[in-house]
Amino acid sequence: MTTEFRKHIQHALTQREVQANTKNVVNRLRNHRRAALSDQADWQRLRRQSTAIRTHAVDKLPQLLELLEDKLTQNGIRVHWAETTEQANQIVLTIMQQHNASFVIKGKSMVSEEMGLNHYLKAHGIECLESDLGELIIQLANEQPSHIIVPALHKNRKQIARLFHTYFPATPYTEDINALAQSARHFLRHKFATAPVGLTGVNFMVAETGTLCLVENEGNGRMCSSVPPVHIAVSGIEKVVEHLSDVPPLLRMLTRSATGQSITTYFNMISSPRKPDEKDGPLEVHLVLLDNGRSRIYNDLELRDTLNCIRCGACMNHCPIYKHIGGHAYQTVIPGPIGTILEPQKSGLNLYGELTQVSTLCGACREVCPVSIPIPKIINRLRWEYIRQSACNIPGAGSGKKKTEAIVWKIWAWSCVHPVVYNRIGRTITNMRSLIGRILKKISAWTAVRSTPKLTKTTLHERLKALKIEDK
């Protein structure tokens, strides 16, 4: 683990207020989820159904994307393909420039975070304003989201009250949650009405009907997608499902796993721009489909399950590592267990391979995942690829390999098939146990936070011989 990454973790462990805020929210989300999924038989049935739907959709990804494009185009929605985040950003910028737009209001979108869209547009003179309350808080604080469902979960109401009072000095200082929400609503209302372009993410894309589905609680997604004359939706290519009938079970799992709700306040289905006989809705709808390494993940049968994720955040809420260090320590767009397997595959093991070490492999993430992603298994695979330069298609494979360690393990493997050498090494280690113990204590990251194991005075063979047990 590099010094820089270790510094992020060590810093996170000293942020007592952040830790308390994070634990408070994830514990509450866990309790809500547990209550919503109290019927275990129904949960397991729905889980099997949702897993089958997502596995089927991802396995047919190329065909479904072609069908999706055809249906969307027939419906009047313009489809744009982006292989990289740079291309996706350029597509959005071009649409903005075609309408002489200098302002875009945004609904919640983790893909836009992946693209770094806000900073990109700002560099080109275009103002971006987040309308989701959590994302607005993060934007005002100039931070990244700490969670994919509750982006500002690391902040408490006092911190938010101070932040709002700084940016909205005309509003009286208050720590009342409802009053804070109302002040944000009052500020955003005019922005919705005057924005020339609205941008949102997408939760599900239905290939059968050419429908974009958007799940939300606050109504900002609906405002962004229906009030401005132009609506741009951005999505990863993996969000597609085949049939409209696939959506209800996935929606049930998403809402219950994410926040413990039976249903969210709003479920938006966008199938076309405004029609001639309609009085509201955007005049243009654009969909930007982002690859950014997803096709590469698709091509590896063992890693393909990563794309099944429906972004519920349950794995984060149940991860002991995330609970202690929070989302910012990961230094990734998506933190927690799903980020641990997704980010290295998208951006390269050379950049994020160390994330695979930040896991206890306890399996809690696998147990709560609504679509049964084998996260611990994939973490182990990525750990292997991180230190082994193989023929896999993951960027940065082998970047974590250390020559000294490789030599030591080769010697160890060789000695294990040569009994005489192995026994002599064992005897030498036993005789030098005090010195070796002190060396391990100084150089091992493992013993830096744990008691150094004590080497025994006798070998196993000697103990067996003393007990008069023959070595057979």
Image (cartoon, rainbow, N blue to C red):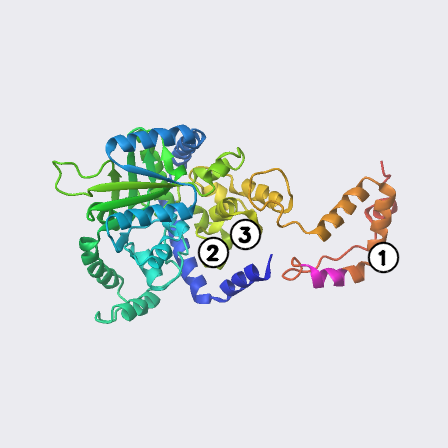
* 343 relative to 350 in the view: left or right: left
Q: CA distance from mark 1 to mark 2?
A: 43 Å
Image quadrant where residue 171 sits: bottom left
Q: CA distance from mark 1 to mark 3?
A: 42 Å
Of circles 1 and 3, the one toward us is 3
Nearer to the camera, 58 or 316: 58
Q: Which residue is mark 1?
A: 431
> What amino acid type should be assigned to the residue bearing mark 1?
Asn
Q: Which mark is residue 351?
A: 3
Q: CA distance from mark 3 to mark 2?
A: 23 Å
Q: Is residue 467 visible?
A: no
Looking at the image, is 94 positioned above or below residue 274?
below
What residue is rendered at 53% in x and 44% in y? 363
Tell me the chief SS of the magenta region: helix
Q: Of marks 1 and 3, which one's residue comes earlier in the chain? A: 3
Q: Residues within 10 Å of mark 3 (few under 14, many from 20)?
A: some
Residue 278: % across, % down? 13, 38
Q: Residues within 10 Å of mark 1 (few under 14, many from 20)?
A: some
Relative to 330, is 220 on the left or the right?
Answer: left
Q: Which residues are magenta?
A: 437-444
Q: Residue at x 43, y 58 (%)?
A: 23
Q: Amino acid at mark 3?
A: Leu
**SS category of the residue bearing label 2:** helix
User: Which residue is pictured at 34% across the width and 28% down the height?
Assistant: 67
Local secondary structure at mark 3 = helix
Identify residue for label 2: 323
- Do the residues bearing badges 3 and 2 touch, measured as CB atoms within 8 Å? no
Q: Position of residue 426 (x, y in %)?
A: 83, 50
Secondary structure under the numbered disc 1 in the rendered image = helix
Q: Amino acid at mark 2?
A: Lys
Residue 83 point in image, percent of width and height:
43, 41
